[in-house]
């Protein structure tokens, strides 16, 4: 039977065809147009229907299968998967029936935080105090850049824990990191930029976001010393987005020599570095270095958010930018919205002032250190020949696989054992020279489940590796 699918591609778009196919299919699944169990065309048929190379569709299908959206069975075609759950779901069992089995699904994909550990009572106390104390000014509109008191407190906090050198008037509260990135993309375009360098491997969602903003992402390879600044210098790009303190996803740290060379590059070209300091709160003191911004406040835009350190639902982020650049950012922001929730901003300020944020971060650093220790031990026991890159902290582990291992086959085999995980290829843009790898997030999986999931991953590893 010739299965059909209402799908098109835009050959004028800057997005690669495989990315377009993948994104379109993902949207159809997420909005309910494609229901679980729905049969979709073969890769050959869809490639013919779209007029593209079959490899384009194969790449899209493989990625969606790795993400858990599609299920491919030999001889049965490709269907839409049942929606995954992050843990076993309890069921009611009738006394006259056998115990019903429930399927456990361990989600080791990146992009999450430990929402279960959100310090609810501390946050409630802060919100309650802010609301009780709020007068006419606090309940009215705040400046688009943020409530002055919140900016003052956050400026002091970032200087204390990350060495960030800025003033409250040069710091903006945003609706998460995403809005900060969107603002920066618009400012760069207004200043004549057409491209933005990104780390390769790096965050695929950010690359797509940059493309949709009108800039062309240019991949710069990363090695054990961080971003290859020598390649950046030859790229012709004048701005770069990066994670210098703890590279996502490999965990490499930008070396001191490259930090200095990067700053020199920015000053020579009148360029900018956008520093995404996404997980510095969870790095051990021995692994933590001051923010790159501390070396060059005139060239580095520092960005962070509460999404990883507290919860994404708060939608709180921040940008610390050079004064001359902040004026442009404020101008763009004024045309977009009238700021974030003042109550949430003041609650965050109180959360910091009372020491609750420091206590929460210490607790989570200890917990994540335990989880990474489990990965180190279990990978040595169940995934022989793998190498855990990076330092012993952070939110995810980059497991470099033996050269002969089929990365995508391992991802698929893991899913059949109820483990959702992504391969290193998912994060690459153009660097195809990297060895196969798995990127294992332990941000939202407790120690017990993490151990079980790695045992199951080891079974898949043995199956694929023979």
Image (cartoon, helix red, strand yellow):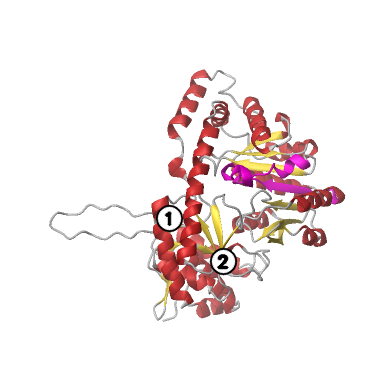
The answer to whether residue 80 shows anywhere in this view is no
Q: Is residue 283 magenta?
A: yes
Q: Position of residue 182 (x, y in %)?
A: 66, 47
User: Circles 2 and 1: CB distance less than 8 Å?
Assistant: no
- First in residue order: circle 2 vs circle 1: 2
**Element class at badge 2:** strand
The answer to whether residue 371 shows anywhere in this view is yes
Tell which of 306 and 293 is nearer to you: 293
Q: Locate residue 313 relative to residue 249 in the image: left or right.
A: left
Residue visible at 74% across and 59% down in the picture: 228
Q: Which residue is mark 2?
A: 437
Toward which corner of the image does residue 340 lie, by quadrant?
top right
Residue visible at 54% across and 50% down in the picture: 395
**Element class at badge 1:** helix
Q: Which residue is mark 1?
A: 450
Residue visible at 54% across and 31% down in the picture: 344
Tell which of 318 and 370 is nearer to you: 370
**Magenta stretch?**
269-296
Toward which corner of the image does residue 179 lie, by quadrant?
top right
Whole-Å distance between the Cαs marked 2 and 1?
18 Å
Above/below status of 105 relative to 259 = below
Residue visible at 41% across and 69% down in the picture: 459
Q: Position of residue 9 (x, y in %)?
A: 60, 68
Q: Position of residue 100 (x, y in %)?
A: 23, 59
């Amino acid at each position: 039977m010739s299965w059909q699918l209402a799908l098109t591609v835009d050959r004028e778009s800057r997005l690669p065809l495989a990315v377009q196919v993948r994104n379109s299919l993902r949207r159809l699944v997420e909005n309910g147009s494609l229901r679980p169990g729905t049969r979709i065309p073969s890769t050959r048929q869809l490639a013919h229907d779209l007029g593209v190379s079959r490899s384009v569709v194969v790449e899209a299908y493989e990625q969606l299968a790795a993400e858990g959206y599609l299920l491919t069975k030999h001889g049965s075609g490709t269907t839409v998967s049942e929606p995954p759950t992050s843990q076993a779901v309890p069921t009611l069992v009738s006394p006259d029936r056998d115990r019903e089995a429930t399927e456990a699904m361990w989600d080791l994909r990146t992009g999450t935080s430990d929402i279960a550990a959100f310090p609810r009572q501390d946050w409630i106390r802060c919100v309650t105090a802010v609301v009780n104390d709020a007068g006419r000014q606090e309940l009215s509109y705040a400046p688009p850049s943020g409530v002055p008191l919140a900016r003052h407190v956050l400026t002091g906090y970032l200087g204390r824990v990350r060495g960030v050198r800025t003033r409250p008037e040069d710091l903006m509260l945003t609706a998460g990191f995403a809005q900060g990135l969107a603002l920066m993309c618009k400012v760069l375009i207004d200043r004549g930029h057409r491209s933005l360098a990104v780390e390769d491997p790096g965050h695929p969602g950010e690359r797509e976001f940059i493309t949709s903003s009108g800039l062309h992402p240019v991949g710069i390879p990363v090695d054990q010393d961080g971003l290859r600044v020598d390649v950046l210098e030859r790229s012709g790009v004048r701005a770069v987005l990066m994670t210098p303190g703890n590279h996502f996803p490999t965990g490499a740290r930008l070396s001191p020599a490259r930090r200095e060379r990067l700053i020199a590059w920015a000053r020579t070209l009148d360029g900018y570095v956008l520093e995404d300091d996404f997980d510095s709160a969870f790095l051990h003191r021995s692994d933590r270095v001051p923010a790159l911004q501390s070396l060059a406040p005139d060239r580095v835009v520092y960005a962070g958010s509460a999404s990883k350190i507290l919860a994404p639902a708060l939608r709180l982020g921040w940008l610390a930018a050079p004064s001359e650049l902040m004026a442009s950012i404020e101008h763009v922001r004024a045309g977009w919205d009238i700021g974030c929730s003042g109550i949430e901003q003041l609650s965050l300020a109180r959360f910091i002032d009372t020491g609750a944020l420091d206590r929460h971060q210490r607790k989570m650093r200890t917990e994540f250190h335990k989880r990474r220790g489990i990965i180190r031990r279990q990978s040595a026991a169940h995934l022989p020949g793998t190498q855990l890159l990076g330092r012993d902290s952070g939110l995810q582990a980059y497991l470099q696989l033996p050269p002969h291992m089929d990365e995508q086959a391992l991802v698929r085999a893991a899913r059949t054992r109820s483990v959702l995980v992504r391969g290193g290829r998912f994060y690459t843009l153009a660097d195809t020279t990297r060895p196969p790898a798995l990127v294992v997030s332990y941000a939202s999986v407790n120690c017990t489940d993490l151990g079980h999931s790695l045992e199951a991953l080891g079974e898949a590893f043995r199956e694929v590796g023979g």
